[in-house]
Amino acid sequence: MNPEERSLFDRMYKVTVENNEILKSIRRTNRISMIVKTIYWGIIIGLSIGAFYFIQPYIDFMTNALGIGTANNTEPNILNTLQDLLK
């Protein structure tokens, strides 16, 4: 191997090492981003379910008070019930 080829080989090796470090950095950043997004959406979904669980007694009370969704409801349509309430 002559000196010119050797220097070319050394430069290619340095560029390859640098590219490898950049690719590892990109992969690490991608993994961290995916973990953070998963945790973020888990918190959002968990809070939504928790809020529904917390508000459910109030929703049940209102539906029972308005007579919506009960078996002895004479109105076949919720829209008619709401129109009667607005009168």
Image (spheres, rainbow, N blue to C red):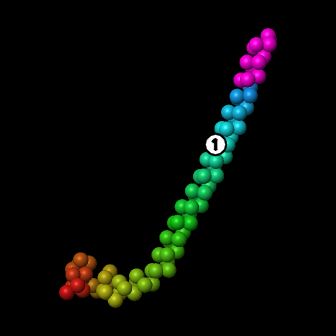
Q: Residues within 10 Å of mark 1 (few under 14, many from 20)?
A: few
Is residue 48 visible in the rendered image? The answer is: yes
Q: Is residue 36 above or below residue 50?
A: above
Q: 64 left or right of 34?
A: left
Q: Position of residue 29 (x, y in %)?
A: 64, 47
Q: 24 left or right of 64?
A: right
Q: Quadrant of the N terminus?
A: top right
For image coordinates 64% across by 52% down, the residue present is 32
Q: Position of residue 57 (x, y in %)?
A: 45, 84
Residue receiving disc 1:
26
SS at mark 1 in the image: helix
Is residue 71 visible in the rendered image? The answer is: no
For image coordinates 52% across by 74% down, the residue present is 50
- Whether residue 3 appears in magenta in the rendering, the answer is yes
Depth check, front residue: 50 or 20: 20
For image coordinates 64% across by 43% down, the residue present is 27
Q: Residue furthest top?
A: 2
Q: Position of residue 63 (x, y in %)?
A: 35, 83
- The majority secondary structure of the magenta stretch comes to helix
Q: Position of residue 58 (x, y in %)?
A: 43, 84
For image coordinates 45% across by 80% down, the residue present is 56
Q: Identify which amino acid the numbered label 1 is placed on.
A: Ile
User: Which residues make up the magenta segment?
Assistant: 1-12
Depth check, front residue: 33 or 18: 18
- Whether residue 23 appears in magenta in the rendering, the answer is no
Depth check, front residue: 60 or 46: 46
